[in-house]
């Protein structure tokens, strides 16, 4: 535990204190470089996962659309065959 100077009032404050006991200024907690790298990696992983999920959904939509078009064509061929057979 170290004592630091409040940036607002210059009072002496513990580095573990959430705010200055003299003026109430919120002391920003300093994060280590390792924690910062870990946060960045987590954010990058989340973005990568989001993009991967988006690509999967896009592929599923294409597959569904292709299946629907194929179904419509099949039904059309059957209906045309039925009408051609009755003539």
Image: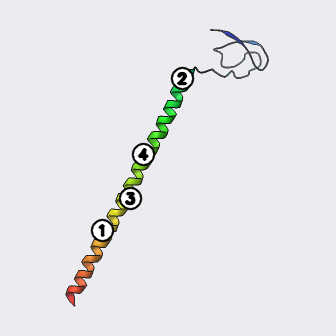
In space, the residues marked 3 and 4 are separated at their CA atoms by 14 Å
Which of the marked residues, 2 or 3, is nearer the chain's N terminus?
2
Where is mark 4, residue-wise?
Answer: 53
Q: Which mark is residue 35?
A: 2
Which of the marked residues, 1 or 4, is nearer the chain's N terminus?
4
The quadrant the C terminus occupies is bottom left
Label 1 environment density (alpha carbons within 10 Å; few <14, some 14–19, many ≥20): few
Residue 31 drawn at (x, y percent): 59, 21
Q: Which mark is residue 71?
A: 1
Which residue reaches farthest right?
9
Which of the marked residues, 4 or 2, is nearer the chain's N terminus?
2
Identify which residue is drawn at 27% across, 77% down. 77
Relative horizontal placement of residue 30, taking residue 66 as reference (left or right): right
Where is mark 3, residue-wise?
Answer: 62
Determine the secondary structure under disc 1. helix
Identify which residue is drawn at 27% across, 81% down. 80
Determine the secondary structure under disc 3. helix
Determine the secondary structure under disc 2. helix
Which of the marked residues, 1 or 3, is nearer the chain's N terminus?
3
Determine the secondary structure under disc 4. helix
Residue 28 drawn at (x, y percent): 66, 22
Q: Is residue 54 above or below residue 69?
A: above
């Amino acid at each position: 535990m170290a004592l630091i100077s409040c940036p607002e009032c210059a009072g002496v404050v513990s580095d573990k204190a959430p705010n200055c006991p003299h003026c109430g200024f919120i002391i920003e907690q300093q994060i280590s470089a390792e924690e910062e790298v870990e946060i960045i990696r987590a954010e990058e992983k989340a973005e990568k996962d989001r993009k991967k999920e988006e690509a999967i959904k896009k592929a599923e939509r294409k597959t569904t659309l292709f299946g629907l078009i194929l179904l419509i064509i099949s039904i059309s061929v059957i209906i045309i065959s039925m009408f051609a057979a009755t003539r």
